[in-house]
Image (spheres, rainbow, N blue to C red):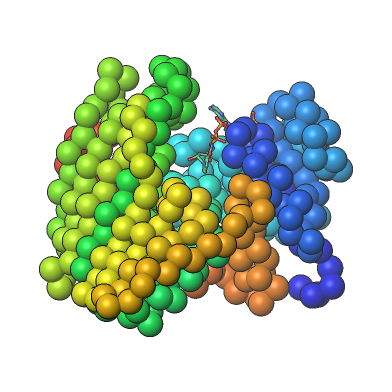
Amino acid sequence: MRATRKIRWGILGTGAIAKKFGEGLKLVPDAELLAVGSRTRKTAEKFADTFQIPHRHAGYDKLANDSDVDVIYVATPHPFHMENTLMCLNAGRAVLCEKPFAINASQATRMVNAARDKRLFLMEAMWTRFLPVMAEVRQLLDQEVIGQVRLLQADFGFKGKWNRKGRLFNPELAGGALLDVGVYTVSLASMVFENPPKEISATAHIGKTGVDEQAAMLFGYDDGQSAVLHCAVRTETPQQAFIVGTKGSIRIHPQFWRATSATISVEGKKDRVLEIPLHGYGLDHQAREVMRCLRAGKLESDVMPLDESIHIMKTMDEIRAQLRLKYPME
Ligand SMILES: NC(=O)c1ccc[n+]([C@@H]2O[C@H](COP(=O)([O-])OP(=O)(O)OC[C@H]3O[C@@H](n4cnc5c(N)ncnc54)[C@H](OP(=O)(O)O)[C@@H]3O)[C@@H](O)[C@H]2O)c1
């Protein structure tokens, strides 16, 4: 792909996060939001008017087959990630697919196999990983500034608006805390320990619609390290992450999933606070990574590799098995 030409995006689905992503793309100078696909003409037109998008498709298949589009951002509820992603890949488009990557590891594996077979770029939109503060945290861990990491504590709980039919509480839409926000904590553990956990223990409150309204997870790793994670969709928690090493600690805040700062404490030294504000919600950073990969001819990102996305789904499968939480479509 020529370095001078803009990368042309399509957005599949026009819900809450699709709008935020549309805003995020405005911050990326070499990105062009060329197309949108929605289930109805009316919603496609409305979204396209908001963002001045020239190609407006009534039907996701029409977007997938729009050969002017370089890469499609899949922004539908979790149970549709696999079918939407496969449709785009089969039509020859690169894909950035929302988190959770799929509803289970078997679906995630199908998506990854399809991308590899077709030699097309695919990435999970775990946008938190691409925030500048997170990139700094990875560097600090690599340089062992806090020694060897021993413990991670992370939580992501919020008070979702109660709606039995909505995405958060409806089992038909793979609702529940683990897949919606717990995935941020599981993915953070995967980033920090660079391995899947050896031992997993989980407990949850299953609410009246049959999905996990809150869950607590304990991971154990090969060298005795551990992660203590919480997630919730009816209870607000501090949403911070705390990484503890043999020589110090890193606290990521104000909310780790949209981090703008980190406090680094090292034994015998004064605390250092790192601050990197976001220009907007923060979704532009993952878009930049996708575009960097496309321009470099890479088929996956080193920051969010596909095998890791599969491992994260496997960890969540094990958690759900312990919770006896199965979705109707599984
Ligand atoms: N909201 C967030 O802050 C956030 C953050 C990060 C990631 N995500 C992820 O992004 C995905 C979408 O979340 P969202 O909050 O944007 O959801 P949403 O507001 O409910 O929007 C989802 C969109 O998906 C499409 N869709 C297709 N089939 C659908 C169905 N059966 N029911 C409802 N919508 C359907 C619709 O677009 P059309 O009508 O245009 O077809 C709808 O507007 C989820 O996987 C979520 O985990 C969300």
Pick out the residue farthest to the bottom. 143
**Where ligand 1 lies, by quadrant?**
top right
Give coordinates of residue 238: x percent, y percent: 36, 42
The residue closer to the viewer here, 211 or 220, is 220
The vertical placement of 39 against 87, above or below, is: above
Give coordinates of residue 83: x percent, y percent: 52, 43
Left or right of 129 in this view: 38: right
Is residue 192 among the parts visible in the rendering? no
Give coordinates of residue 122: x percent, y percent: 56, 61
Image quarter hosting the N terminus: bottom right
Residue under the image location 60 percent in, 74 percent down: 298
Left or right of 122 in this view: 199: left
Residue under the image location 45 percent in, 22 percent down: 161
Residue under the image location 37 percent in, 68 percent down: 271
Residue under the image location 22 percent in, 29 percent down: 205
Left or right of 232 in this view: 131: right
The vertical placement of 149 against 227, above or below, is: below
The residue closer to the viewer here, 318 or 130, is 130
Give coordinates of residue 280: x percent, y percent: 66, 49
* Number of numbered discs overlaid on the protein picture: 0
Is residue 258 among the parts visible in the rendering? yes
Image quarter hosting the C terminus: top left
